[in-house]
Image (spheres, helix red, strand yellow):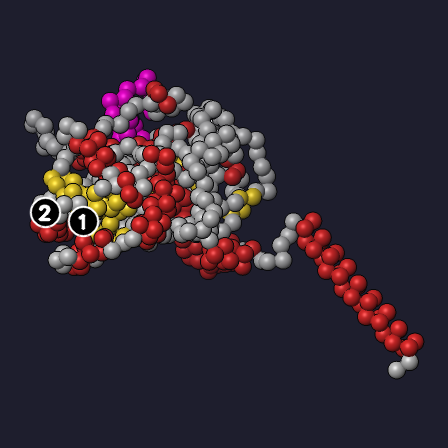
Amino acid sequence: MSEKSMLSSRLFFYLVTISMFLLILSSVFLLECSNTSIIPRSVFERILVNSTSVYFKPSFRSEQITSPFTPSGDTQINVERPVRSGKLACQVNNSSRKMPSPGKHRNMECVPSQAHLRVFMYDLPPEFHFGLLGWKGRVNQTWPNVSNPSRIPTYPGGLNLQHSIEYWLTLDLLSSNTPNVLRPCSAIRVKNSSQADIIFVPFFSSLSYNKHSKLHGKEKVSVNQMLQRKLVQFLWGQEEWKRLGGKDHLIIAHHPNSMLDARSKLGSARFVLADFGRYPVEIANLGKDIIAPYRHLVRTISNGESAPFDKRPILAYFQGAIYRKDGGFIRQELYYLLKNEKDIHFTFGSIQGKGISSAGQGMASSKFCLNIAGDTPSSNRLFDAIASHCVPVIISDQIELPFEDVLDYSQFCLFVRASDAVKKGYLLDLLRGIKQDNWTRMWENLKEIAHHFDYHYPSQPNDAVDMIWEAVSRKISSLRISLHRGNRYKRSLSLVQNN
């Protein structure tokens, strides 16, 4: 080949190389400047779900963004329905990403058009809700003023408090219409039921059971039964109930004995429950209902005061009622297996005296906290353990857990089958076999998710109230799909008939 030919070949090679480099550089520049991604959103979300366990709040966009909402309590709310993006899963693992901290976005005001859930709440008389707390408003006043947190009616303490979910959710809806109350935008109350995703029934059913289920004097019907009968009569008479047979109604029945008289009559509604232990499957099930955490009784310890592995001298902790009925027989079996072990605290206990503070101190000094089935599959003890950063050991085969579609409990809890737990030596060998680094990993995960189980007023991002509304929103999506599928042929036939 001649020297001239070789020179031409080299020049052509250099030109091609430079052109390819410029093409790649310009492509990168265009991608950086563009608002669109080369990865379709659905694929991108799948990548995120499979590669990280961080809890992502869904993003929302609307055709029309309104100014921050600060109406009076009686203002009519008209909300544009936002275009909803997919919900990404939360699974706690050893990812370097951190979950959002509660209160991180406290200074952001809620824009109604961006609310995740639009809720219509019946204006039931106070006898169904705050009247049960002894609150008395002015003539024709249905709701207390919730603008000042220090002046809202207080919920009874002790064991009553563990089932107070009805109280926190109602307060949150009221605050969504209250000026100057900063809260997440998960749920907002609307005054027109046709705009609502869900119809909320503000009956304090757990409090009604705890305070008014017994007969007094010459009463033949308890106050609790009377209120349930009145509620059924009221709901069955509402157009909102008749529209879908109650399928879009939300009823709080967190105490396992609440709504005993009415639950079968209102079983088409969606319930917020502690578990399904005392419900037939046709009345309550995971397909339509929401499991909510108990309101823990011990104080929440901060991450800074949370003791590490070598500062927790107790291997495993349990304090409470030992002799229980139904599935709770396992407690007494474990008691006889573990009571004489030096590094195990397994004793009777109650909330009397300093029982709650004693339990909190004991859990905070323990590596593992035993959550054993009692009269029902769940108990407040699990959430006391989480608040104490004591790794829960769940021995309850039928338990259902809050937010389990977005939280992977196996990352911060141990699960032991009841049949294994009662084998001599099994539980002790398991707990003593867990090394410090593995326990510390679960403890770190526990600290990251603990705020999901705290109830606040006003509510905070990713706290229990916020998480419950998100769970309701996910359930409503399945209802909406069912309704739309049911309209496929009905709508077409109606168009023909109208012609």
Q: Given the image, on which type of amino acid does mark 1 rest?
A: Ala
Magenta-colored segment: predominant secondary structure: loop
**Nearer the viewer's eye, disc 1 or disc 2?**
2
| Among numbered discs 1 and 2, the one appearing first in the sequence | 2
Question: 406 and 316: which one is in front?
Answer: 316
Numbered tag placed on residue 340 in the rendering: 2
Q: Would residue 74 be found to the left or right of residue 27 on screen?
A: left
- Residue 191 on the magenta span: no
- Residue 134 on the magenta span: yes
**From where the camera sits, is residue 242 visible?**
no
Q: How many marks?
A: 2
Residue 311, image x and y in percent? 28, 40
User: Residue at the spot x=26%, y=41% of the render?
Assistant: 312
Residue under pointer 1: 373
Residue range highlighted in magenta: 124-142
User: Residue at the spot x=62%, y=54% of the render?
Assistant: 37
Residue 367, image x and y in percent? 26, 45
| Disc 2 crowd, CA 10 A, few/some/many (<14, 14-19, 20+) | few
Secondary structure state at the residue bearing disc 2: loop
Please state, as top left, top right, bottom left or bottom right, where the C terminus lies in the image: bottom right
Residue 452, image x and y in percent? 37, 41
Q: Is 134 situated above or below 272? A: above
Q: Is 209 situated above or below 8? A: above
User: Residue at the spot x=57%, y=42% of the render?
Assistant: 62
Q: Residue furthest top?
A: 138
Please state, as top left, top right, bottom left or bottom right, where the N terminus lies in the image: bottom right
**How far apart are the two marked residues, 1 and 2, measured between alpha carbons?**
21 Å
